[in-house]
Structure formats: structure tokens, C-alpha cells
Image (cartoon, rainbow, N blue to C red):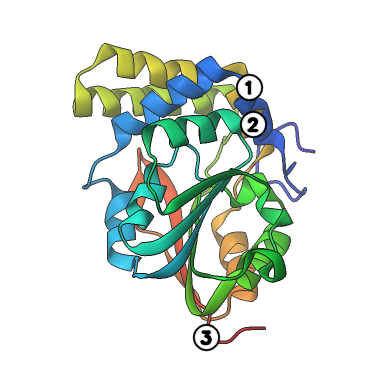
Amino acid sequence: MPTTTDGPSGAVPAPRAAEKLYNDKHLISLYNRFARSLDSPEAPMNRWLDRNLETGRRALDIGCGTGRYSLMLADRYDEVVAVDLAPSMIEIAERDRSRPNISYQVRDVLSMTPERDGVFDLVLALGCVINVGPPEVVLDHFRRLTAKNGLLLIMESMWEPGWGTREWQVNFAFRTARSVWDSTGDLDDVSAVLQVILNPTWLEIAAIDVPLEREAFIHEYTAALPGATIEEECKRLGLGVFAVSWRAVERE
């Protein structure tokens, strides 16, 4: 398990490091406010999803959190299965973002199988691959959950120098806080951002779950998902982001 982030780590990320975050309901409430403050139709992630999402019968939202994107899927798919390891996240999702066609579940996605859970016309994983496990394992699993002609959409942060160090995290926190202030003008929103990103648990997670650098990312993802489209122009809060779209032409 890496303890420093002077460069991209070759070690396998701890697959459950983020679970520590989910034991604090107050922190989760702050996180929910923080996430809402960044959300708008013009946000880069929302624009990318709007361009790439289709319609269909079944969708799987992996690491759904408080259900922000589950609602978007519910407008396009007959059935949405939204899974997250954090009971407190699912509790908020069921309370604030309930829909008849969304099934929120406290669940480890690696426990899902095509035989038991079926396959999905859309598999969506936003910012969660490094929290689940090694990419070569996780991507293979996501691929097997994708129906023939179905779509797998993934968005992950891009590694940058200093990732996870205290200095990097402080700079990211205040950059994000400034963005939120410019967007909402609400000091409580700004306070929530700083409390979440500078929380000791969040700092620990950032130091453990280290994104892949550009070359390693492209290598891992093109090997696991032949024919995938990888975009790099998506930017969020000044942080580089990879956006991946892959079509399951055949079922394995």
C-alpha cells in the first residue's frame, strides 16, 4: 500500500480505502452539499454524459453515491440499478432522489455477476475504478456486466505531480472552494467543500488511491477495452480527467 505520492504508484490501490469516508454521516452530508454545489447542466461531466448517454432497458450506476447521476439515467432507461458500498450515501439517495425505476442497493459491484444480476445496456462508473480495485480486474468485470451492443462509460481523474500530498490537497481544496463561491456565492457551500476535501480521512484516501498517469492509463484501458474512445479534454476544477466510452460489440 503506497504511503507517498511523489510519482505514479505501481502498487495496487487498496480497493476499500474509500470506505473509511462512509462511516461519518456528518461528512457524507457535507459531501452531498459539496457535490450539489458543483452540479449544473453546463458542468463538463454533465455535458459529456449528455453527448454519450443513450436510451435502453437496463442501466447500472456503479458507485452511485447520493444518486446524482442515477436520476439522469432514470430519464433514459426503464430500470436503473444504483450500487454503492456506503449505507449513508444510499440513505440520502433513497430520501432525496427516489424514482420508481431506480433500485438503490448497498452492494459491492464485484459481487455482481451476469448469471445472478443479468447484463446492462449501460454500465456507468464515474470516478470509482481506482476505489474498486486494480484496473485490469475491475475493467474485465465491468465488461462482463455490459450487454451485447451495450455501452460502458467511465470517467477517472488524471494523475498530476504531487497528487495526494498535503500541499496538493490544500491547493485543490481552495481551488474548488473558489469555483463553488463563483458558482453559488454561498459561504456554507464553500465551508462544506473545505471540510470535506481537507478532512484527514479524505487526505488518507487521496494518498492511497492514486490515479494512473497518462501513458499507463491509456495502456491499461485500451488493453482491457479494445476499441474504446478515450478523451482527455474534459476538465473539472482544473483537474485533468479521462472520459472513456466502450461499445460491447460481442458478448464473451
Counting residues from the start of the chain, the first of labels 3 and 2 encountered is 2
Task: Kindly report the distance in space between the C-alpha atoms of the residues bearing marks 3 and 2.
Answer: 36 Å
Task: Kindly report the distance in space between the C-alpha atoms of the residues bearing marks 3 and 1.
Answer: 41 Å
The residue sitting at 32% across, 63% down in the picture is 76
The residue sitting at 42% across, 28% down in the picture is 32
Q: Secondary structure at mark 1?
A: helix
Which is in the foreground here, disc 3 or disc 2? Answer: 3
Please name the residue that numbered disc 1 is placed on.
Answer: 201
Q: Secondary structure at mark 3?
A: loop
Please name the residue that numbered disc 2 is placed on.
Answer: 205
Please name the residue that numbered disc 3 is placed on.
Answer: 249
Q: Are marks 1 and 2 in contact (CB under 8 Å)?
A: yes
The residue sitting at 45% across, 26% down in the picture is 31
> Horizontally, is 87 left or right of 111 in the view?
left
Which is in the foreground here, disc 3 or disc 1? Answer: 3
Q: Residue furthest front?
A: 100
> Horizontally, is 182 left or right of 146 in the view?
left
